[in-house]
Amino acid sequence: MEPDLPERVVEILVRSKYAGFVSRTMSARLDYIVEIASLHTRDDLLRQRGLGRLTARRIERWLELHGTRLRRVDESLDSVICRFEFRRGAIKSKTRDTRILANSSGAIISA
């Protein structure tokens, strides 16, 4: 099984209606492509021009490799978004000039 999605599939996902919930910038959307893909239901994918049943299944398998899945029909977008994990590393605070780090358990610590 391929670890990456074809470029055309990634392009469709980063331009999908749910990608804007994750970020406005294309570079951030690419960084969070797994999260963007997980916001879709199977039916959402099948309604995307250029994605068929085989490609939808390929996306499902790809998400499984990344430890996640497509959104269920009975699941709200906000419940899926709440499951997103912050990327480990530094985040610059907009309100003060300190660095905020997430430790391995997800707790926020200042450095």
Image (tube, helix red, strand yellow):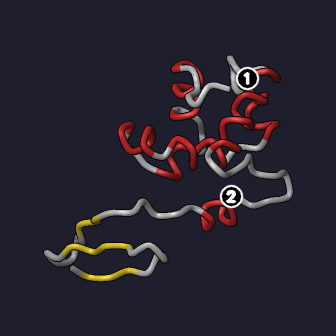
The quarter of the image holding the C terminus is: bottom left
Secondary structure under tag 1 reads helix
Q: Is residue 36 left or right of residue 50?
A: left
Q: Compared with residue 92, is residue 14 higher up or lower down, i.e. above or below? A: above
Quarter of the image where one finds residue 6: top right
Tell me if 22 is positioned left or right of 102 in this view. right
How far across and how far down the image is residue 65, in percent? Answer: 65, 42
Q: Choose the circle earlier in sequence order: 2 or 1.
A: 1
Q: What residue would you read off at disc 2?
A: 77
Q: Nearer the viewer, residue 3 or 110?
A: 3
Residue 19 position in % (x across, y down): 53, 43
When asked about the image quadrant of residue 88, the answer is bottom left
Question: From the viewer's perspective, is residue 65 above or below residue 68?
Answer: above
Q: Type of residue at label 1? A: Thr
Check residue 55 in the rendering and tell me which mark sits there, or answer none: 1
Query: What residue is drawn where x is 39% and y is 45%?
Result: 28
Relative to residue 14, is residue 63 drawn left or right? right
Q: Residue at coordinates 69% horizontally, 66% vertically from top-left?
A: 79
Which quadrant of the structure image shows residue 26?
A: top left
Q: Residues within 10 Å of mark 2 (few under 14, many from 20)?
A: some
| Quadrant where the N terminus is found in the figure | top right
Q: Residue at x 52, y 25 (%)?
A: 11
Residue at x 24%, y 72% (from the top left corner): 93
Q: Which mark is residue 86?
A: none
- State the CA–CA distance, disc 2 to disc 1: 22 Å
Tag 2: amino acid:
Leu
Secondary structure beneath dot 2 equals helix
Residue reaching furthest to the left:
97
Q: Is residue 88 above or below residue 51?
A: below
Q: Position of residue 51 (x, y in %)?
A: 71, 21
Q: Nearer the viewer, residue 76 or 90?
A: 90
At which x and y percent is residue 94? 23, 70
